[in-house]
Image (spheres, rainbow, N blue to C red):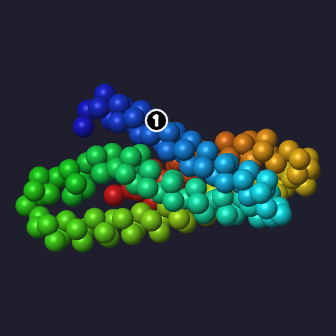
Amino acid sequence: MNDAVEKNLGFVQTLWFLAVGASAALMHFLVLVSIVNFTTITPAWANVGAFLIAFVVSFFGHFYLTFKPSHRSHNSNYSSSSFKRNSIKSIGTNHRSKYLSALIKWFSSSTAGFIANQSLFVLGLRWFGEQYYMLIWLLVTGAITVMTFALGKFWAFKS
């Protein structure tokens, strides 16, 4: 690929990452606020449940949009000329294998990000008080975003 095409793909991928990440973050935030407002669960524990729900949005969005096959390595089976020669069965097996691998790696990446997020979130709650949980969550989530992009791009969804 030439440099202009690679830069364009990188820009598009970054936009998708931000869009999917923002969608997952919005889901996380809405679930967090809902749990805190409608139950007796503390913000720290509500954040765990909100993370698990947002993970689903994040994985599917990043797998099918941000790091979709056309964004993956140009040496992968998705873009090679041998792709057309593969049988439907081997394509399905190959897709399931890539899907499962990406799922496990993205869950690991997301969990690492969540552990960092949760640690900073709890620390912020202790320092500033639970009444500021929304602002603390927003600041912490913004700080962790760069780490999760790098883990997704260079490890979890890398072909």
In the rendered structure, the answer to whether residue 145 lies left or right of residue 75 reads right
Residue position for label 1? 15
Rendered residue at 44%/40% (across/down): 16
In the rendered image, which quarter is residue 102 located in? bottom left
Whether residue 118 is visible here, answered yes or no, is: no
SS of the residue at dot 1? helix
Rendered residue at 17%/70% (across/down): 90
In the rendered structure, the answer to whether residue 102 lies left or right of residue 144 reads left
Quadrant where the image shows the C terminus: bottom left
Q: Tell which of 10 and 90 is nearer to you.
A: 90
Judge whether 63 appears above or below 135 on screen: below
Residue 135 percent coordinates (x, y): 79, 41
Mark 1 residue crowding within 10 angstroms, few (<14) / some (14–19) / many (20+): few
Residue 26 percent coordinates (x, y): 61, 45
Q: Tell which of 93 and 32 is nearer to you.
A: 32
In the rendered structure, the answer to whether residue 14 lies left or right of residue 119 reads left
Question: How many labels, in total?
Answer: 1
Residue 86 percent coordinates (x, y): 11, 64
